[in-house]
Amino acid sequence: MDDLLDGYRRFRSGRFPEQQANFLRLARDGQAPGAIIIACCDSRVDPQMIFDAGPGDLFIIRNVANLVPPYARNKDYHGTSAALEFGVAVLEVPQIIVMGHGRCGGVRALLASDGEDVGDFIGPWMNIADAVRRRHPRQSDGSVDAATLTAAELDVIRVSLANLMTFPFVRDRVKAGTLKLHGCSFDVGLGHLLVLDPKTGEFIQAEDDGAAA
Ligand SMILES: [Zn+2]
């Protein structure tokens, strides 16, 4: 905790005063984020950093493997669905970006397991992407090669985008043209962002100015 408090003190003396007017405006007017980002919990994949965004810009929902469950109304505890409902139906955020990433431990667990056998909660959660496991089988010796893992990571993004459309409050807005859905994937090692082309269904590397030497 001491490391975190050191960081907090740097924030209070540095970035907070730089952003104070912005924070005061957000406190006064409330939030109106420009995008909902559904990303993985993975500590290497911070949407606010990757998109160079500031306070109030992004409504970020993070869970294991950036999964969106299918719409289900029951007494279960639907954390991701509740956050989605708040962002879409209450805040009326105009776009949702599902952001996957390379070397995802959740997707690797999905491919390496048969379903319910990973932890108390991870296995059942990853079963949202059961179809991905079937489409990208592991090797006969039980291993998962890099190409299969990458293809499965991208496929998980497609599953989440399809499941988003099972939510009536998402589907209605997409059909009305007031909500747009996008997919992308971040390469942890290279820093590249792949963006899903809705016309072809393929992921294309986003243009950038390259990394500084
Ligand atoms: Zn992940």
Image: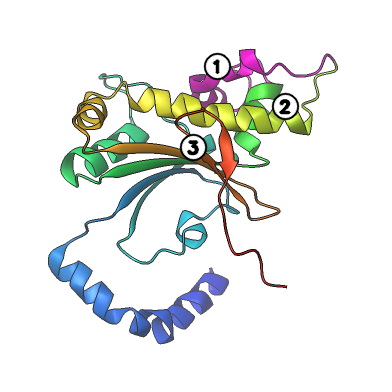
Label 1: how many residues lie within 10 Å, few (<14), some (14-19) or many (20+)? some
Question: Residue 144 appears in which quarter of the rendering?
Answer: top right
Q: Is residue 124 magenta?
A: yes
Secondary structure beneath dot 1 equals: helix
Whether the residue under disc 1 has CB within 8 Å of ligand 1 = no
- Distance (Cα) linking label 3 and label 1: 14 Å
Sequence-first tag of 1 and 2: 1
Identify the residue under disc 2: 148
Q: Which residue is mark 3?
A: 66
Neighbours of disc 3 within 10 Å: few (<14), some (14-19), many (20+):
many
| Highlighted magenta segment, given as a residue range | 113-140
Left/right placement of residue 155 relative to residue 63 reads right
Q: Earlier in the sequence, mark 3 or mark 1?
A: 3
Give the spatial CA distance, label 2 vs label 3: 18 Å
Q: Which quadrant of the figure contains the C terminus?
A: bottom right
* Circle 2 or circle 3, nearest the eye: 2
Instruction: Of the two numbered discs 2 and 3 on the same chain, state the one appearing first in sequence.
Output: 3
Where is residue 159? Give x, y as percent.
Answer: 48, 24
**In front: 33, or 81?**
33
Q: Which residue is mark 1?
A: 130
Q: CA distance from mark 1 to mark 2?
A: 15 Å
